[in-house]
Amino acid sequence: MRSVRRIRVCDALSVKDICGGPDAALGTPSAGGKFHFFAPPPHKPELADMARFMVYACSTGGTLLHAYLHQRRRTEWRLAWKQLRQSSESCLPHRHHRCFGGCKLVEAGQHQVYPLAEHPIMGIWRAVKAVPHFYRIFRMAKQHFETHRPDAVVLVDYPGFHWHLAKAAHQRGIPVYWFVPPQIWAWATHRVKWMKKSVDHVFCNLPFETEWYQKKGMPCSFIGHPYFDAMSQQRLDESFIYEQRSRPERIVALLPGSRGHEVQDNVPMMLNAARLVHQQVPDTRFLVAGFKTKQAEVIREQLVNYPELPIEVHVGRTPEIINLATVCLSVSGSVSLELLNASLPTVTVYKIGQILFRLVSIFKHAKYISLINLLADCVVTPEFLTNKDESKPMSEQLIAWLKDEPSRLVVKQQMQQIKAGIARPGACQRAVEHLLSTLQTRGKAAA
């Protein structure tokens, strides 16, 4: 009797995203946001096992993780499947890929059906407007559950869309795993009840997450954060770094976020803070890390209001800019882990509208918005979750670090201590091993 081994993987890399997923045939999340269907490959009678994956993603915020997983997917999953094959005498999976996703998947040689990565959603009204669109996606996913039943569904972050997907899979008797779980410990914590009803196991990325889920009675295991897998493989552009370091001024990094609305809401305040810093510390200049060319153009248009400011906007240079900077002003997001990895003293900001700000004050349970402070359980780096212009207090902190080297080094040392407790590469491999081990156990039990 031929054993059919199928896994369906859904990936979204932040609570700000709609849905997401790994390159399932290879077991790894895809870059730039994707929604993938993997058509069943033609099988040969002699093959004992076949793998099929379906991937969903709409996030561009997890580019580092995505890029790393694309780079490593063949090695890690072939090793994992080799171990499985040795015990079950099966073969490596054959796979055909179709994607609803972004340019990174196209670059990886996959056929793009729909550019879903162009439509990340955050905020109440944006989500409401997107309901019909994502309802159609949900119907497609359920249909795929019926026509290509998987052995497991692996979700990555985003609770909004994935609650429904998890419920649909659970109702069909398909095991559900959550890799990079949603930050439900931060707000609307009652949602853990929904998770317990539809999810079999959670792969936790942060130490305090594991403790929180265990207290709630949710089966989980700590595997570490996949961002440190990505960062261990980073290769910086040395020519760019050399050119920047040949100039004498100290560099202040400005990281305005990866989403259009984040740039629109936060950049004016960040530029005003940069102007205040430069007035007090003239030997500084500013590098802005634009995520997309279109966003960089928006930022450059605003620079006409700051002709005296020595500032450059670069696209695709976030790691290099972090490496070059003395201090940083950053929009809150997954980039916090890159900043932690570099131990770069950072002021974190996130500006939102008045209505959303009031709702956050009601539903938010986490003490902090920065992962650095959450990991430390105290304020190591200043943060501003706000609905108004906070450029003055933000600039004052940056100025203090630039004028007082010992105070900046204290923060840097604190960040290094936090990093030492969490920066453990191998999260993706540990998740792969756990998943395949569980599937193998289930297969033996079914036999």
Image (tube, helix red, strand yellow):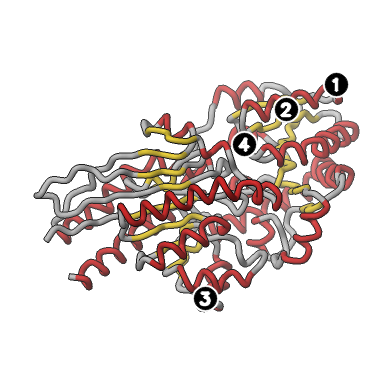
Contact? badges 3 and 4 (CB < 8 Å): no
**Residue at coordinates 83% horizontally, 39% vertically from top-left?**
269
The Cα atoms of the two marked residues, 3 and 4, are separated by 37 Å
**Count of all numbered marks drawn on residues in the image:** 4
User: How far across and how far down the image is residue 10, in percent?
Assistant: 44, 52
According to the image, label 3 marks what residue? 214
- Three-letter amino acid code at disc 2? Val
The Cα atoms of the two marked residues, 4 and 2, are separated by 24 Å
Q: Between residues 395 and 304, which one lies in front from this camera angle?
A: 304
Determine crowd level at label 1: few under 14, some 14-19, many 20+ residues with C-alpha closer than 10 A. few
Q: Which of the marked residues, 4 or 2, is nearer the chain's N terminus? A: 2
Q: Quadrant for residue 267, please give it.
A: top right
The Cα atoms of the two marked residues, 1 and 2, are separated by 16 Å
Between label 1 and label 4, give the one nearer the viewer: 1
Q: Between residues 237 and 70, which one lies in front from this camera angle?
A: 70
Q: Which of the marked residues, 1 or 3, is nearer the chain's N terminus? A: 3
- Three-letter amino acid code at disc 4? Asn
According to the image, label 1 marks what residue? 307
Determine crowd level at label 3: few under 14, some 14-19, many 20+ residues with C-alpha closer than 10 A. few
According to the image, label 4 marks what residue? 323
- Residue 298: image tag: 2
Between label 2 and label 3, give the one nearer the viewer: 2
- Callout 3: SS: helix
Instruction: Specify the quadrant that holds the N terminus.
Output: bottom left
**Residue 212 located left or right of residue 170:** right
**Residue 331 located left or right of residue 14:** right
